[in-house]
Amino acid sequence: MSVRLIESLGEVVRQPAGSVLVLTRAASAQAVGYRLEVALRDAASAGAVALVLTAPAAVSRSAWDLAERVSVELLDPRTSGTSPLGAVVATAFRESHGDLAGLIAAVQSALAGDAADSLARAARAVEGIAGAGGVPERIAEEVGAAMGVTVDPDFTTARGPGGHRADATEIVLRLAALAAAAGAVDELPARSRAHLLTELLVAPEKQAQELVPRARALGLPIDDWHVILRFEPVMDEGPDRYAVLDTLASRATRAVRELAGPSWNAALAGDALVVVRTVPRDQGSMGLRQAVREAGALLERVRPAGAKVRCGVSTCHEGVLGLRTCASEARTALRRDRTEPLATYDLSGLDRMLEEWYSSDTAQQAVRDLLQPLLDLPGGQPKRLITILRAYLDHHGSPAKAAEEVNLHRNAVSRNIRRIETLLKADLNNPQQRLALQLACRAAQV
């Protein structure tokens, strides 16, 4: 918004849009009767904001009405303005003692505001937005009060000063629109946090780190200490499995609201429901025992009728990387113990040794070399055959016990073991080969 000094009424129509037009005393003296109405129409045509009279003039009722119709403020700075702009012009006129050059400078300065003032206003507006709880009406009020503008309900325009304050207002309005679109804080959709939690667990490590600020903004206590409870349906792949997962997620969302103390968040991750139990600090072994008790109680509450569900519980780790470690531990607990409905991660035993060993590139390559003929098979065969081989080796070569674990007939286990020996060119009677394959099978399922 600029301030222009007009010496002749004929100049009005050529002024830039958004201007405040200050008539000299001579031009003000000309602006009487129909000439004032012509000047108002020219001002409206040019897109001027206001027309300021600096000399005494008799303004007719029709001129006041016309000014209102064409949305051009008609101002007399010798009187107190009733609008924000009128008040600015009246104050500047008094302080300049009627000097037009001083009046122009004072009005321009007051309208534009300096950079420091605009920055301070923007900071107050941001604080107001943060405290408005996502309610659009409150956000608009806070922005309007801080920036000294009239905010439209859709946060796209504002009427008021220009200059530095206009630039600051535009930035604040964009932030206000985003805050209003996010909705009230107490109504923030849980699914937004759930989707982000899934991304944090499955994304590459670098990308997961980049998601941390967004997690904090959504209210996920990502920097605290976590334990993960991983719930998996026990059934074949298919539509029924996902129906069970949906039911698990729905029931878990309701159930964790009633658990006091820790912060709880849930998300679907692949073929499992992941529930994250978060506390501000590491509670040691006592906290882990409590987490296991809560996992057992949740398992009973969320299990759909007629469905088998198992739960794996991790140990406690801090931050986003700790969260991902928890997810791996909970999955490992379920893979290691396939019989009990509630499995806990073995912190000091083989699970931890395997994870540390398998984290090296050399170990991963060794596992791939040993199992590659199985891994090259199509469809779900690699997973099925590795599971059978592991059960067979874990039970000291007993087809009957392995069959019981993998839910197959002992003859089917024997046939698959012969096929595996052929594919791997392995001798399962050789202790070294047997140990190497047993470790490889466990590592492949970590």
Image: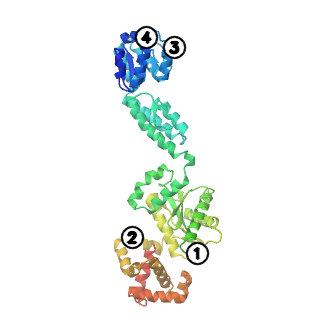
* Residue 249 falls left or right of residue 6: right
Picture quadrant of residue 165: top left
Q: Amino acid at mark 3?
A: Arg
The residue under label 3 is: 61
Kind of element beneath mark 1: loop
The residue under label 2 is: 359
Labels 1 and 3: the sequence-earlier one: 3
Q: Find the distance from the CA under tag 1 to the CA under tag 2.
A: 27 Å
Q: What residue is shown at x 49% (from left), y 43% (from top)?
A: 179
Q: Quadrant of the N terminus?
A: top left
Q: Find the distance from the CA under tag 1 to the CA under tag 3.
A: 90 Å
Provide residue 306's location: percent of width, then percent of height.
65, 72
Q: Find the distance from the CA under tag 2 to the CA under tag 3.
A: 86 Å
The residue under label 4 is: 32
The residue under label 1 is: 340
Q: Amino acid at mark 1?
A: Glu
| Label 2 crowd (10 A; few <14 / some 14-19 / many >=20) | few
Between 7 and 392, the one nearer to me in the picture = 7
Q: Amino acid at mark 2?
A: Ser
How many numbered marks appear? 4
